[in-house]
Every structure is written in structure tokens, then in C-alpha cells.
Image (cartoon, rainbow, N blue to C red):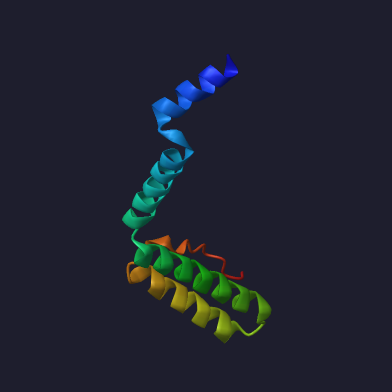
Amino acid sequence: MSEFVKGLFSLITGGAGITWTLVWETLKAIIGRITWRVVLERFLTRVLVEALKRLKTLSSNRIVDETVDSILLQLRGDGLLMAKIESSKKK
């Protein structure tokens, strides 16, 4: 009975080769629709923002802190809305 079910399944799906080909073609279509420039830009923006925040925590110099805050605000003002900048000024 199980051989009959396996044979019927293979007949309906076209065998393992066709199934994997369908999966591969579907993955290629999904990956092809992604705009990789946007993904890369957002990734690099987040890396830059985190690096600047880390630099700010390493420095005890107020001028460096203000410069980092200024750069972060300029990034946000230039349309990089994904920068996720929290105001963390020392009080």
C-alpha cells in the first residue's frame, strides 16, 4: 500500500526533481525581487550609527560628543530615516 501512495505522490508532483526545481525557481524569483542597494544602504547606515554611538561612549571629550550628535542629526536630516537615533546627551 505504501508503494502505491509513493507512486501516486510521485505521479502527482512529478518526482523529486521537478519539486526541487520548483522550489529553486521560487527562491530565485523572491531573491531577484529584492532591491539589494536599499538593503545594503540600510545595513551600512545602521553600522555607521552604532559605530558613532560607540565612539561617543568611549570619549570623555564633550566636543567629540557634540560632533557625533551633530553627525547623527545630519544623517537623520538627509533622509536616512532608518538611522534610529536616540537622543542620549549627557546631562
Say left or right for 72 vs 58: left
Asked if 53 appears above or below 64 in the picture, the reply is above
Asked if 2 appears above or below 49 in the picture, the reply is above
Q: Foreground residue, 62 or 3?
A: 3
Quarter where residue 38 is shown: bottom left
Q: Foreground residue, 81 or 90?
A: 81
- Could you say where residue 56 lies in the image, as x and y percent from the top left? 60, 77
Quarter of the picture holding the C terminus: bottom right
Q: Foreground residue, 25 or 57?
A: 25
Quarter where residue 21 is shown: top left
One can see residue 80 in this view = no
One can see residue 82 in this view = yes
Say left or right for 58 vs 46: right
- Could you say where residue 25 lies in the image, as x and y percent from the top left? 37, 48
Residue appearing at x 38%, y 45% in the figure: 26
Asked if 74 appears above or below 30 in the picture, the reply is below
